[in-house]
Amino acid sequence: MAELTTETSQRNTHAESSQLCQVCRRNSEVQVPLAELNKELQSLVQTNAVTSETIARICPRCLALFNRAQEQLKSQAEIYGEGDRALPTPLRMDADERFTGRGVTIAFLDSGFYAHEDLTAPVNRIVAYHSIFSAEDDPTFLQTPDVASWHGMMTSVVAAGNGYLSDGLYRGIAPEANVVLVKIGKTGRIPESNIQTGMQWVLENRDKYGIRIVNISAGGDFEQSYLINPLSGLVEEAVRRGITVVCLWEMQVSLLVILSYLPQAPHRVSLSVALMIRTR
Ligand SMILES: [Zn+2]
């Protein structure tokens, strides 16, 4: 069924000149009706599309991605069985598996963390843990259940988990990266001053741990020009020193605005949004 695209697509091209793919939201003149795919593939697409709407057609790029994903899942069927499943992140994001993050350290600023085995086995890749709340600046805190720790565990494992608990299947995009975990919040909203404190620590310890990427999964307090906002200044300083700063997309907070101002700043910066975590 994988090669059915040409005839179907051409037919469809005449029917509708241009439309958005329901799965990737790219504009594609060529669309493949989902009904023409095999049932398993239809189900896989519907399960992993980030939308609650019924998928009627997809673009050829998405079709190729889901075909590859289906082949990989079949190779693991003995372990995980058949049926609808959430795709592992690298499969869903069509990541180039030649790049694993080896030799790169990613720092995470988040409310809290847990030492998930996908980060610690067979080799512990948590190279440092720091809490801006000094009483909790102790690696044993990573083993202690805490209501604020799930969010940072999610972001760090999505990015750098190696799938140890799932025989390598549910790994992150950078499964060989080292991580530095910086706790900047407790329950509830994380104030911008906490993000600043965490960023400052990252800048001071950048060389010690070889930090090249910082992921900030927290928002700012309010919209303010980068010219006077201290967090913008710190982010710009980080970028100037060669660190890639990543923030979450679609957060209703000012951090997005702060970052969007940065390209106009005196120093050239490049910002990338590498993590887009949405729930259905
Ligand atoms: Zn698509």
Image (spheres, rainbow, N blue to C red):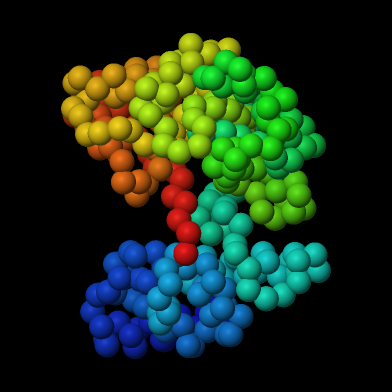
Which residue: 54% across, 71% down?
Answer: 47
Quarter the N terminus occupies: bottom right
Q: Can residue 147 be seen in this view?
A: yes
Q: How many labels does the image show?
A: 0
Q: Position of residue 122 (x, y in %)?
A: 80, 37
Question: Where does residue 200 sit, x and y in percent of width and height?
Answer: 43, 16
Query: Which residue is at a point 25% across and 33% down the rendered structure image?
Result: 222
User: Which residue sits at x=57%, y=33%?
Assistant: 112
Given residues 67 and 121, the one toward you in this image is 121
Residue 192 lies in quadrant:
top left
> What is the quadrant of residue 154 in the picture?
top right
Judge left or right: residue 209 versus residue 200: right
Q: Which of 7 and 141 is in front in this view?
A: 141
Relative side of 141 to 257, left or right:
right
Place of residue 44 in the rendered image (x, y in percent of width and height, measured from the top left):
57, 73
29 w.r.t. 104: above or below: below
Q: Residue 58 in the image: state x and y as whole percent.
A: 41, 75
Along the line of sight, which residue is nearer the eye, 202 or 192?
Answer: 192
Q: In this view, does 203 lie above or below 263?
A: above
- Residue 240 shows up from this direction: no
Left or right: 209 in relation to 163: left
Rendering quarter of residue 18: bottom left
Q: Which residue is drawn at 57% across and 58% down?
A: 91
